[in-house]
Amino acid sequence: MEPIVKAAFKAREKAYAPYSNYRVGAAVETEDGEIIVGCNVESSSYGLTVCAERVVLASAVAKGYRRFKRIAVSSKGDAGPCGACRQFIWDLCRNIPILMISDDGSVEELMSGDLLPRAFDNRFLKKNDE
Ligand code: THU
């Protein structure tokens, strides 16, 4: 298993998912080759739950990273990122490979742009310095 896949697979064990029992791990590779991990974190107020993909990207940004090469997500079966996370990935990473890892370790790779056609992003908003 390549490091980013292994990291996402392993991060799944950290998931806090007492309500759904659906565990998700994620890993993102920064421009300079660092790998940062995340997992889903659920809330008793269900709607406050945060998906693994958003946790990993928020964590990476908080660590000072802004440029990402790839993201890997480990979950049950052949699920891909939810719609909200596709938007979040596009916002912060633009068109990068998303590696989707099943329980058995098999990996399917799709581009974030292919998972979110005609994406909305800050090109449509007034200019800022971010
Ligand atoms: N979940 C993720 O972490 N990523 C996704 O892309 C889909 C859903 C989490 C949220 C919640 O904790 C659990 O999976 C069930 O929806």
Image: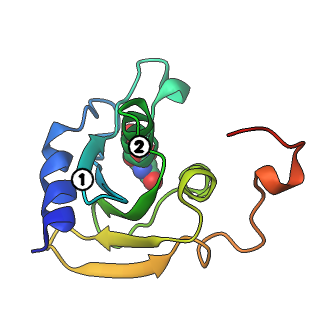
x and y percent of residue 10 in the render? Answer: 12, 52
Q: Position of residue 22 (x, y in %)?
A: 30, 46
Three-letter amino acid code at disc 1? Answer: Glu
The reply to whether the C-beta atoms of the residues labelled 1 and 2 are less than 8 Å apart is yes
Q: Which amino acid type is shown beneath numbered disc 2?
A: Tyr
Q: Earlier in the sequence, mark 1 or mark 2?
A: 1
Q: For disc 2, does the CB lie below 8 Å from ligand 1?
A: no
Q: Is residue 128 above or below residue 73?
A: above
Residue at the spot x=28%, y=34% of the render? 17
C-alpha gap between disc 1 and disc 2: 9 Å
In the picture shown, does residue 41 fall above or below 1?
above
> What's the mark number on residue 34?
1
- Is disc 1 placed on a helix, strand or loop? loop
The residue drawn where x is 18% and y is 47% is 11
Residue 126 at x, y = what percent? Answer: 90, 42
The image shows residue 127 at horizontal and vertical percentages of 85, 43
Q: Which residue is mark 2?
A: 65
